[in-house]
Amino acid sequence: MFIVLLGPPGAGKGTQAQRLAAATRLLHISTGDMFRENVKNQTELGQLASTFMDKGDLVPDGVTIRMLLERISRPDAAEGAMFDGFPRNVVQAIALDEALAARGSKIDRALLIAVPDDELISRLGGRWICRNCGTLYHERNDPPRVPGACDRCGGELYQREDDRPEVVRTRLEKQKPPADLIQHYRDAGVLREIDGLRSLDAVTESLLEALAR
């Protein structure tokens, strides 16, 4: 079985990927892990990817696709895999479809953890940090006893630029799965949408049910 796991930042995709991998024993292929492995081993593709990553740029589709195809050619991917962070767009999705078709396989399920933007902004944009001791707080999930003050040392709390709601909203627009990618898997009849507003355990159960069906 080959599975694609989709979801925007803040949807809990990374946690659910680990849970699914443990429950299904499928190989978990994370784009981030794949990049780090190639960079660490100084492969040709790793060195090429580094030239973009070091500047904070996205690695081009051609490099990412080549890296992914090399990864699924290894023996441990013969029985299937779960892709986390790939594909990011339709170009990558088509390349993956073609590579799997060449070996007589296909994407069996594309699982989308769906969470409304307002909820994602609340999850990602509510973090505050103590200037004095560095203790982290979340204005909804773990608020300080006194607004603006650290429980541990009384220091002033501040919000990093990346955690401000307007910055989070911009980041979401850039990083959430594009509509045409979701439609690609919907047209293929393999897309299943999971309500990501529920508890971690409930989301995990729904993901496993979607696979079982």
Image (spheres, rainbow, N blue to C red):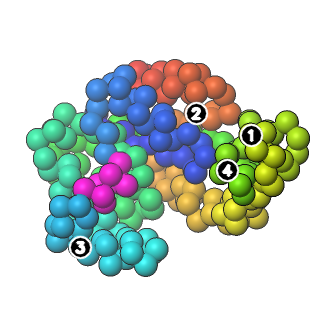
Q: Secondary structure at mark 3?
A: helix
Amino acid residing under circle 3: Gln
Is the residue marked by circle 4 packed among few (<14), some (14-19), or many (20+) residues within 10 Å? some
Is the residue marked by circle 1 packed among few (<14), some (14-19), or many (20+) residues within 10 Å? few
Amino acid residing under circle 1: Arg
Amino acid residing under circle 2: Ile
Residue 67 position in % (x across, y down): 24, 61
- Label 4 belongs to which residue? 133
Name the mark on residue 47.
3
Name the mark on residue 194.
2
Image quadrant assignment for residue 36: bottom left
Residue 2 position in % (x across, y down): 30, 38
- Residue 183 shown left or right of residue 143 in the figure: left
**Contact check, label 4 and label 1, Cβ < 8 Å:** yes
Q: Secondary structure at mark 1?
A: loop
Residue at 16%, 66% (x, y): give it. 43
Dot 3 or dot 1, earlier in sequence: 3
- Label 1 belongs to which residue? 152
- Residue 71 shown left or right of residue 205 in the figure: left
Dot 4 or dot 3, earlier in sequence: 3
